Amino acid sequence: MKILVCIKQVPGTTQVNVDPETGVLIRDGVESKMNPYDLFALETAFRLREKMGGTITTISMGPPQTTEVLEESFYMGADAGCLLTDRKFGGADVLATSYTLAQGAKKLGGFDLILCGKQTTDGDTAQVGPEMAEYLKIPHVTNVCKIDSIDDGGMTIEMNMENSLEIQMVPFPCLITVDKDIFTPRLPSYKRKISLADDVKVQMLTLKDMYDTNEKHYGLSGSATAVERIFPPESNTEKEMHEGTTREMTQVLYDILSEQKYI
Amino acid sequence: MDYKKFDEQDLNFFLENFDRKRVFYGKEIREDYSHDEMGTIAHYPDILIQVVSTEEVSKVMKYAYDHHLPTVVRGSGTGLVGACVPVFGGIMIETTLMNHILELDTDNLTVTVEPGVLLMELSKYVEDNDLFYPPDPGEKSATIAGNISTNAGGMRAVKYGVTRDYVRGLTVVMPDGQVLELGGKIVKNSSGYGLKDLVIGSEGTLCVITKAILKLVPLPQKTISLLVPFDSFSEAAAVVPKIIKAKHIPTAMEFMERGTILFAEEFLGKKFPDTNSAAYILLTFDGNSKEQVEAEYDSVAHLCLNEGAKDVFIVDTDERKDSVWSARGAFLEAIKASTPEMDECDVVVPRNRVADYIDFSHDLEKKMGIRIPSFGHAGDGNLHLYICRDKMDDVTWKRTLKEAFDQLYGKAFEFDGCVSGEHGIGYAKRNYLEEDYGDYTMNLMVGIKKAFDPNNILNPQKVCEC
């Protein structure tokens, strides 16, 4: 089985400042890390490889330093990694990013399954996975919280619909975005880090390597939207107070916990 | 011990002189106040006063002194050896409303706090100000005065030391109501006997702490942990003295066994990142840059691999730290949830005897047919072992517990260890302290207790008996 996992490098902390004049995230001097949601996608890939055999390739788009997160995926167990990097890819919105990643996936070719995290911690749109699937003309399922069964033809998965669970069968090739906590992600291995040091290299693909080399389809010029303003959300200190007898309060608490799916 | 019985006249004094909302007596006193977290001994106080100032504490103590009433101080009640249990009833002074951070002195790098400030509040406050209070006991809802009273240690002791190393000054109320300032913001002090240091670790037997000046250090900017798996506990523990010998000082060196990790998984409903190995060492390194920390852990990681580690896992982001440390933080509660009753042994042994000691506890488990899950601070030799009651009947449990304790403490003494590394002696461990120290040393302690509290009204029958 050939699996592709999409990963993104995001700021290492939630304490990211926004430039008040340009409205852009200040990334200088801020450490970066792999998008935490992508760790779940990567772990899902490892579990499926253990069961089905095959290979795992990771893919990312970004400036050259993004190789760090791809290398980290090697230390966790990925077999290969590819970085889509070109100045022409810069300033991409969700649409252009999805298109570029889809082009990269096409170029690498032959994947049975593409896995994404459900969203990123910096963009939070949760749209790149589905849009990529549309460009690749393959079925996709989002918010997958469990894989019930898998064979060579496809998978039966559970999709978290907030207030309900939907069980679906999806044939390969397909793309799924996985929910947080589908599996506990493994930790990067120092042993793999030192043993792979010189052997595995990140493959770099630029615009000229793509099947579609029309630069108008990429980066800022390929974007359908522009960011007008970024601002930190107001913190919410709202509290809910309920009063009543123990019996009533038990019911209220039960309802809240059920609604939030803690129980 | 012959104390005056708490009567209506005493009750009236407190009702008249204190805010009624902060005075509780009889059935008004919640069950919680009759025991600590371990709950091996229970007794209610006659009256509970939630104090809000040094003056109030002084007023309570003066009354207790004049009327010969036993008095116990309590913080959050997270202790494990019964130190805050009022075994003679009487007065309980509760400090959790004295929970204000009074001053952050960035010239002297100190923070001044009231006794009821919780450890988690303190660390958050100082870290928000880019400063660091290094002592890191697992129980974050403990009060700072509770930590001072047991000289709490925690995970970072291997590099940064224990609570005593961070207490610069104390305001205390003596058993007769007199208020004293011990130490201060000063860094050095050769002025007579170190009374402040006697109070630290005295478990509420000498005086009541009402204010503390704590030393702070600059906040390390980067922290990375390594989770190192081994095939056996012996191999894991054997690597610790080698790391120390190679002159590496991690911030923390914890050991954990698969069984305990599985309890934590079940307790938290959350999977640990790796449970394929029998034993793990968790190492933490801190410093001011990623490069500095990586350079430091690099040689330790190599050393571990050369010494038989199966791998070295890197715990470098908030999510990864949470997945590992949340399990570590839940060990005590998780073991507690796995059995109807348990008691703990908080011994400390020289670091190079940790492996032998845990091997001994495993042999003891087999020999006695009982469970003794453990975890602890491999880097400072402080081990936490929990004797689980499981399905034993009352008589068997009491007999087994005593036998297991006798064996475990006996072995610790044989290894030149001590009864308690960080949880204290309280009520539960006095016999073993006496066994370890002998009459001469115990008499010295009794002498100190008498000098502070001649009428023996403050937390009687704890630590040493007068």
Image (cartoon, coloured by chain):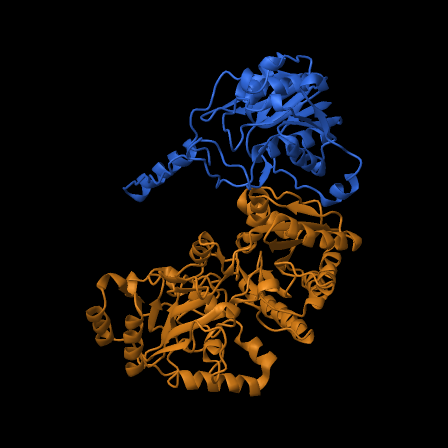
Rendered view: A182 above or below A91: below
As drawn, B57 above or below A145: below
**Whole-percent x and y of residue B300?**
72, 55
Residue B432 in picture, x, y percent from top left: 57, 76
At a point 55% along the width and 27% down the height, the residue shown is A118
Q: Position of residue B36 (x, y in %)?
A: 44, 63
Location of the N terminus of chain A (image quadrant): top right
Relative image position of residue B125 (x, y in whole percent): 43, 55
Report the residue at 48% width, 80% height from top: B194
Chain A's shade in the image? blue
Q: Which residue occupies the extreme left position in the image?
A: B16
| Quarter of the image where one finds residue B342 | bottom right
Kindly tell me whether residue B82 is visible in this rendering: no
Examine the rendering and report whether any part of residue A92 can be seen.
Answer: yes
Task: Give the camera-side residue of B150 and B410.
Answer: B150
**In-front residue for pair B461/A60:** A60
Q: How many marks?
A: 0
Q: Is residue B143 above or below residue B434?
A: above
- Residue A33 in which image quadrant: top right
Q: Is residue A262 above or below residue B125?
A: above
Q: Chain coloured orange: which letter?
A: B
Question: What residue is at 56 percent from the left and 88 percent from the top?
Answer: B440
Q: Nearer the viewer, residue B246 or B391?
A: B246
